[in-house]
Image (tube, rainbow, N blue to C red):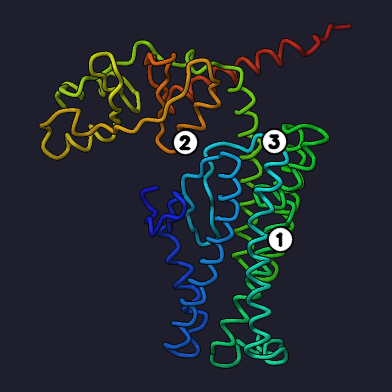
Amino acid sequence: MRAALTVTTVSGIAIRVHASFALILALNAWQWSEFGPRGALFGVVLSAFVFTCVVLHELGHSLVAKAFGIQVTDITLYPIGGVARLVRRPETPGQELLIALAGPAVNVVIAAVLGLSGLWLFGAEPMWQSLPASRSQAPTGLTLWVWLTASNVVLALFNLIPALPMDGGRVLRAMLAWVVGQRRATRVSAVIAQVLAAGLCALGLYSGNFVLSLIAVFVFFGASEEVRDTDFQRMLDGVRSGDAVSSQLPRFSPSTALSEAMQAVVLWPARAFAVEHAGRLVGVVTREAILAALRTDGAGYVASLMAREVPRVEARESLEVARQHMSETGFVAVYDGEIFVGLITDLELAHQLTVLEAFKRSAGNRSKPSRSNP
């Protein structure tokens, strides 16, 4: 998330703008620049307002998710839209359905408010004529109003296309999950999404709308990622978090010198190390933090680098629960009651997934009937 700048926080959710977002501002400024500096400024202002509506769309998802007890870490704006990052998946199809519908519902409300207020401010005929004529005349306040209204209508309708990972795809999956279960619903929804993505990509290339083609590529690979993530979830649900902890991983004390910590970094490929004091976990220091400190002066102690806020799970909870908690930091502390058991990092998680996938393939090969030669 280093390429994203946090601009504000709403209800505990960080609102971030990715560095690549500057591309869409530049593109819209250029598209309206035929009307001079005022037109270029209009393009930037229009983009800012449209993406404010995108943030409100994502907040709709996020606030409903929080109502179901699902933590939302941040909302990040990219050139092709916004992404709200949930710590865990919805537990039921009903939750996923309501969360998915909340975003487009926000855009419907915004479009209705803008449309009705626009009728009162400007009148029906000027609004109706403004949109098709807007690119042939200098932009005005009416132009901005009409484009914002139309943009929210498009955002609502486009997001309801039944293609994962878009909102409509999640609605489709939730409805199918009531009938065929989550795993099969994801696979069916992903196939539908990839067929639609291929069609959208072809349409974008044919019409010269390369943004549409880019979105289609995002949908195609996003659908595959949804299937992969569902498979991972199913496999990790069968493993206890306590069983994934490495007992051999070194642990530091707050007074461990950075030079000594560096020896552990060289010998162990771990991404993070526990910092203990009197048998209690007091923080976690990452590999990157140690290396960065050593590149400057190399002096100091682990205490100055450690993160004190560490997500935790119980040893009896599944590895999928651990994965959800470590989505933000890349590590999670495992406890047995009040006893610290150890850390799980993305490295241990990747190792467990490799073992589980290998076991799955082996079991699949053993279940195939052998062919006898005639």
Q: Amino acid at mark 2?
A: Ser
Residue 179 x, y percent position in the rendering? 83, 35
From the viewer's side, name the closer residue of 360 and 277.
277
Which of the numbered marks, if any, corresponds to residue 300? none
Residue 347 x, y percent position in the rendering? 42, 25
Position of 12 relative to 340 (above/below): below
Task: Give left or right: position of 324 versus 213.
Answer: left
Disc 3 is placed on an element classified as loop
Which of the numbered marks, if any, corresponds to residue 327? 2
Position of 64 relative to 92 (above/below): below
Which of the numbered marks, if any, corresponds to residue 202? 1
Q: Residue at x 10, y 32 (%)?
A: 299
Task: Give left or right: position of 227 versus 337.
Answer: right
Residue 232 x, y percent position in the rendering? 60, 28
Q: Amino acid at mark 1?
A: Ala
| Badge 2: residue crowd in 10 Å (few <14, some 14–19, many ≥20) | some
Which badge, 2 or 3, is on the more N-terminal residue?
A: 3
- For label 3, the residue is 92
